[in-house]
Amino acid sequence: TAFLSGVHKKNQVTCADCHGKTLTVDDSETALNKNCKGCHGGFAELATKTKEHINPHKSHLGDANCTACHKGHVASKAYCNYCHSFAMKIPAMGTEQESNDKKWVQESASGKKELKSNRVESADVVVIGAGGSGYVASITAHDAGAKVILLEKMPITGGNSMLAAGGINAARTRYQERLGMHDDPAEMVKETMKGGRDKNDPELVKVLAYQSADAVDFLVSLGADMTDLVRSGGVAVDRTHRPVGGAAVGPHLIKVYRDNAAKRNIDVRVNSEVVQILSDGKGRVTGVQVKGKHSGVYTINAKAVIDTAGGFAANNELVGSFKPQFKETASSNQPGATGEGMFLAEKAGAKLIDMEQIQIHPTMGGDTKVLVSETVRGSGAILVNHAGKRFVNELTTRDKASAAILAQPEKSAFLVLGESTRKSNVQIDGYIALGLVQQADSIAALAAKMGVPADTLTATVTAYNKAFEAKKDPEFQRQDIPRPVDGPKYYAIWVKPGRHHTMGGVKINTEAQVIGKDGKPITGFYAAGEVTGGVHGWNRLGGNAITDTVVFGRIAGSNAASFIKKE
Ligand code: MEZ
């Protein structure tokens, strides 16, 4: 209680002030968080009180639980520091800056492993993992009449979707048509297959592409803004939809999902880790066992289970077991992306596929865990090596762009961009705020900051700007040059490839049913999003992950709800 008394003593805070009269705590710490906000103010109010330019109460994590960072009885710690290294000062902060993946996960779903209770609950549908697909599946199943419980092992909902910077790929949408652009889901199928080296399941890809425009309409119906368009690698049109001004898609969508789940009173529980998917021994799932941070292990009987627990690119050991060469590379993923959802499904009979297919994103910010979005290249940035030269088509697929960077002697490169590109993409201001960007008034001065030869960089930029004028890139055949590298200010970001997405996982069919080792669907068992394999083949296109979460999240939610009605 040392920290607690230190912080709350002078205001004579009592146990009941935080915990309520009954002194009970549910796994989501609902009353506790309500009481924190009651005394200290909500996130919006606290954000106005922050003087530092890094404002943790106004971040891409949105309006989360206070208890994700602030602890009452043990040392507090800043959740942000899993990825970021800025010196956060929070009350009663511990001395240790922890970035060990496992510690973050273990703490949230607690050490109450041994405590088993007789508690048994029931629901129509249990959804495992409150990232993008989990929310979409839950909202869809709820709207189709099902009683849903959505479980999240971490203290914060959002999963990797919360960190998604780019956008959602969709073909032939009203937003494309409004801008006079012609797109075709058949082209999306072709490019997704080509990007995935034709190792994708073509039936899943068809579903992805042909339902993508509906997915965007669904998001808009929930209140999302998907009006802005940008080009992603491996694609011949502007197909990536995102909020106006190029704002990051993930935080926006997760806010929309959280608000919609709250409006519907969907039962969302954080700090609640599924430890077993239950089955009747005759080929159908019957519920889950959950380990709650405070309640220990309990059972939820359910007529259907939807696994949306995400991938494993944050799990060093697991990544290393499939691809030893990637073990020590940085990961862009949230700390909970550790892959348990795949193995829980496997234990319940599911077939796992393509587990060794791990995507390396070309542009993580230098030595950080911050992803510099592909949309920065899509908006106009070029990739330059340490000799000051372009060396790859910036809009090629990620596998090729990453390989080209890793083939440089320094295994890193720079994004170089001008003022018009910065203005077109609000995320770049975020990278400036995080200290990732060098700025200068001339290309020669920028070159000096980057440590590259000024005359070479000047020649590179001049040649590229000529390509912009001519709308043709003879050197690297970049298919879209939306902006020149223009002044008055010029910018450079040092980048390195890092682990971003795991393409393998649970095998599903086009109905989002989980396929068993015998090749047949497992009754009552559905999955969607990064926990599944097959949609992206051996390389995912930028912008296709959000499409995957929405398209297959909707299918899983809708089919689970129809299934329980037939029961
Ligand atoms: O889909 C993605 O992973 C994506 C667009 C990421 C990014 O670079 O912004």
Image (spheres, rainbow, N blue to C red):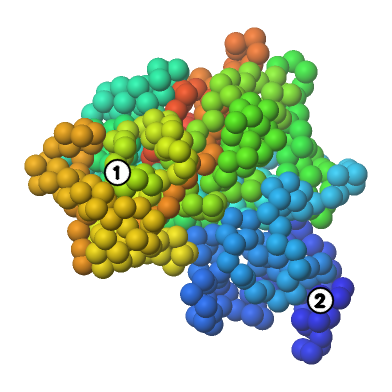
Point out the quarter of the image occupied by ligand 1. Answer: top left
Characterize the local packing of mark 2: few (<14), some (14-19) or many (20 or more) Cα atoms within 10 angstroms. Answer: some
Task: Please give the label number shown on residue 432.
Answer: none
Q: In this view, which residue lies farthest toward the bottom?
A: 10
Residue topped by disc 1: 389
Which residue bears the numbered disc 2?
A: 4
Give the mark nearer the N terminus: 1 vs 2.
2
Q: Nearer the viewer, residue 205 or 498?
A: 498
Splitting the image into 4 quarters, where does residue 297 fall? Answer: top right
Local SS, label 1: loop
Looking at the picture, tell me which residue is in the foreground, 179 or 460: 460
Q: Residue at x 75, y 63 (%)?
A: 96
362 to 83, vertically: above or below = above
- Whether residue 241 is visible: no
Depth check, front residue: 223 or 515: 515
Q: Quadrant of the N terminus?
A: bottom right
Q: Position of residue 29 (x, y in %)?
A: 73, 62
Q: Quadrant of residue 323?
A: top right
Residue 444 placed where, x, y %? 26, 60
Amino acid found under the numbered disc labelled 2: Leu
* 272 relative to 421 in the view: left or right: right
Q: Seen from this angle, which residue lies furthest top?
A: 518
- Whether pointer 1 and pointer 2 mark residues with C-beta atoms closer than 8 Å, the reply is no
Q: Nearer the viewer, mark 1 or mark 2?
A: 1
* Amino acid type at image mark 1: Lys
